[in-house]
Structures are given as C-alpha cells and as structure tokens.
Image: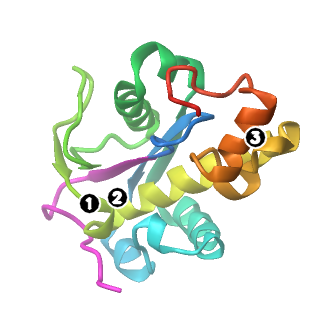
Amino acid sequence: MAKLLPYAEAGRVEAGCDEAGRGCLAGPVVAAAVILDVETANSLALDDSKKLTSKKRDELRILIESKAISWAVSFVPHDKIDEINILQASFLAMRESVDQLFVRPDHLLIDGNRFVTSPTMPPHTWFIKGDAKFASIAAASILAKTHRDEYMLKMHNEFPDYSWDSNFGYPTKAHRAGIDRYGPTIIHRKTFRLL
C-alpha cells in the first residue's frame, strides 16, 4: 500500500472531499469532508475505501472521527437525486459537508474530475483517484462509505427483499431480482433504470 500524501500544499488548511453511492439504485448519495493534521494523516493506515475490508473501514472511521481536526458527513436523499440528477446531488452533498465543518478550510481537495462550487466555498482542486493519493480524501471516502452503508443496513431491516445487507443499494443481480419481484421501494431512485 503506497503512503498517501498528507497535503497538496504545505501551510494551508485543506479539507478532503469524497462521496459514496453514486451508482446505487436506492438510497441517498453521501459525501464527507475531512481536515487532518499532518501527524494524523501520516499515522493512520488510510487508503481508498474501495480497497479496504468493511472491518478495516469501520476501525478507521472511529479513528478518523476521533482524531480529525474537523469532519462532517452529508446525505442527499433519493428524491432530491431524482429532482436534480445524481451528479448535481453528489456536488450538493460535498458542498453541504464542507459547510458543516466547524473549522473553515483554506482549500478543498476533491475526488473526481469536476466539481460545481458555490460563492461560499473555498477554492478547490480536483484529483482523479484522489482517494488513492491524499490522506484527507481517503478519510472522506471512508466516512462517506461507512455512514452510507450503516444507513442502508437499517433500510435492509425495513425492506429485506433487496439484499441491501450485501449490495447496499448497488445494482446487483439479487437487488434487481427483488425489484422485479416486489417492485421499487420508497427509497429507490425513480430516474434510474431499475431493471
């Protein structure tokens, strides 16, 4: 595992931002923003959340939430996704998570290849596969993923016919079989191709 960089530019307060759940058929898109100090960024064994086991993500979530200078998570629900589209909902979730930080960052490090900012946002730089490059983006990816997975596990208890305890709303064969047999739930994204 390559060591992730603690910052893009020394001497400024940077918040890493990432989202989870863009490709799902059901549930919210969730974004996180995280500010880490250099020591924490270097000491945690952070990586892109997709490369970690769920046990490791859960362990790291506790450490990130206890050691980060500031962190925040934002949920944009399925009906808002249907209203404004998934890309805009992802940007909205990231902006909301930044707005919730109690320490204002000087600069945002965004995972991906674009971002729609707002007049209240600090300047930003986006990085393709940023969650495999910068510790703060990796931390944000872990928080977004673990908070979203936790939500979808609760939803699985209400709607057990879609295998959300294993697919978390992503378009697997079991998920689509559930939609085919029982129809969509209230948290399915109606603008997505469900079958």
Q: Image height check: is 116 above or below 61?
A: above
Quarter of the rendering occupied by the N terminus: bottom left
Q: Image height check: is 171 above or below 60?
A: above
Q: Position of residue 16 (x, y in %)?
A: 33, 53
**Amino acid type assigned to the residue bearing label 1 in the image:** Gly
**Hey, which quadrant is residue 128 in on the image?**
bottom left
Residue at the disc numbered 3: 178
Q: Nearer the viewer, residue 113 or 45?
A: 113
Residue at the disc numbered 1: 130
Q: Pointer 2: residues within 10 angstroms few (<14), some, or many (20+)? A: many
67 with respect to 9 (left or right): right
169 with respect to 14 (left or right): right
Question: Magenta residues, as a range?
Answer: 1-19
* Between discs 2 and 1, the one toward the N terminus: 1
Q: Nearer the viewer, residue 82 or 133?
A: 82
Q: CA distance from mark 3 to mark 1?
A: 34 Å
Q: Main secondary structure of the magenta part?
A: loop
* Between discs 3 and 1, the one toward the N terminus: 1
Residue 151 visible in rendering: no
Q: Pointer 3: residues within 10 angstroms few (<14), some, or many (20+)? A: some
Residue positioned most to the top: 83
Quarter of the rendering occupied by the C terminus: top right
**Amino acid type assigned to the residue bearing label 2 in the image:** Ile
What element does badge 1 sit on?
helix
**Hey, which quadrant is residue 95 in on the image?**
top left
Tag 2 and tag 1, C-beta contact below 8 Å: yes
Q: Pointer 1: residues within 10 angstroms few (<14), some, or many (20+)? A: many
Residue at the disc numbered 2: 137
Residue 3 lies in magenta, yes or no? yes
